[in-house]
Amino acid sequence: MPYQKAKVYHDGSHYIAMPPENFPRRKRRYKPKPKKEETPDSPKAKFETAYTESQSLPKRERKKFIAEKLKDTFHDKEKTAAFIESNIERKKNNSAKRRVRLMRKVYLQSWNFFVTFTFSDELHTEETFKEKLRNTLKHMVARKGWKYIGVWERSPEKQRLHFHGIFYIPDNAMIGELVEVKDYSTKQHRVQTTFQNTHFQKYFGRNDFKELCRQEDIMQSVRYLLKYIEKSNERLVYGGKLPTYFVSDILDDDIICPYGVDGRKAILFDNFTCIDEGCIVGQASEEVIKQMPKCN
């Protein structure tokens, strides 16, 4: 058996194994220094503000906009340009890491709804809307086994607050009832049919529950979330147990070929044998993977 307790994830095409011996954890010999609190006048804080504001501009104009905002920070064009380049690269790297982490979590779970909750000023302030919706979803996770990945977003024209997310709601775990509603879509300029939840309608207002029946529906929904976090720099909100990997011993016959930088990973056959603590659980499938130990 070439690998024991390898971390395994799905990249959308294949299962990929990460042997622990090829990815050793670094042992910290000292405690990391506490992070310095950024003041509003610090170069990094100014960059973050300018970077967020620049997202509404065409890409070719963003650097110029940020440079204009930071022109009095360094009093040197070369230092300003170098600072902007390094921080834009930092933002790109962090975004790529978040995207990879998101996709690995998505492929390891089942999803059955794309849900949108819309702020209603008749029922809440924006603060109470956020607070009470978070609290309600927290209870659904703890009591009903819900899972979700979502993002806060404002509509382009009216700037009305929304929460979009992909959800896994187990059978018989839905609260309220899903009711078919026909209304006029100002965005699409036509009558549309949606399904709204009576419980969330009562306590939060407008909501839309769209069933995800195909893998392509799930991927389209994930791309929708990514569009908003890239546009607004918002962070994703996770709810429930959403591991990134499952853990399995890997047989030599289940490896197609080495993969990644220096071949430290391995591409596996789709029906590879899942083994936990030396015991064969079965060939890789949704039901078998549910039984395997998970980790992040």
Image (cartoon, rainbow, N blue to C red):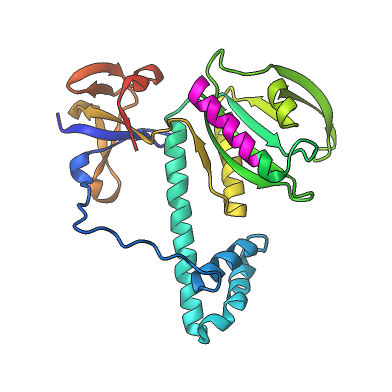
| Quarter containing the N terminus | top left
How many numbered callouts? 0
Q: Quadrant of the C terminus?
A: top left
1 or 267: nearer the viewer: 1
- Compared with 2, 69 (above or below) is below
In the displayed structure image, the side of residue 122 where residue 66 appears, left or right: left
Residue extending furthest toward the left: 1
Determine if residue 108 is in view: yes
Main SS, magenta region, reads: helix
Asked whether, in this view, residue 219 is left or right of residue 253, the answer is right
> Residue 40 in the image: x percent, y percent?
55, 69
Whether residue 216 can be seen here: no
Residue drawn where x is 75% and y is 31% of the image: 205
Q: Where is residue 182, by image quadrant?
A: top right
* Front-lying residue, 53 or 106: 53
Q: Nearer the viewer, residue 197 or 19?
A: 197
User: Is 247 above or below relative to 64?
Assistant: above
Residue 137 on image: x %, y %? 57, 30
The image quadrant that residue 295 belongs to is: top left
Residue 282 in percent (x, y) is at 28, 16
Position of 226 with respect to 16 (left or right) is right
295 relative to 33, above or below: above
Residue lying at the far bottom in this picture: please name it.
75
Point 34% across, 26% down: residue: 270
Spot occupied by residue 291 in the image (x, y as percentages of width and height): 33, 19
18 left or right of 58 in image: left
Span shown in magenta: 130-143
Q: Quick check: is 139 in the magenta stretch?
A: yes
Viewer-closest of 157 and 104: 157
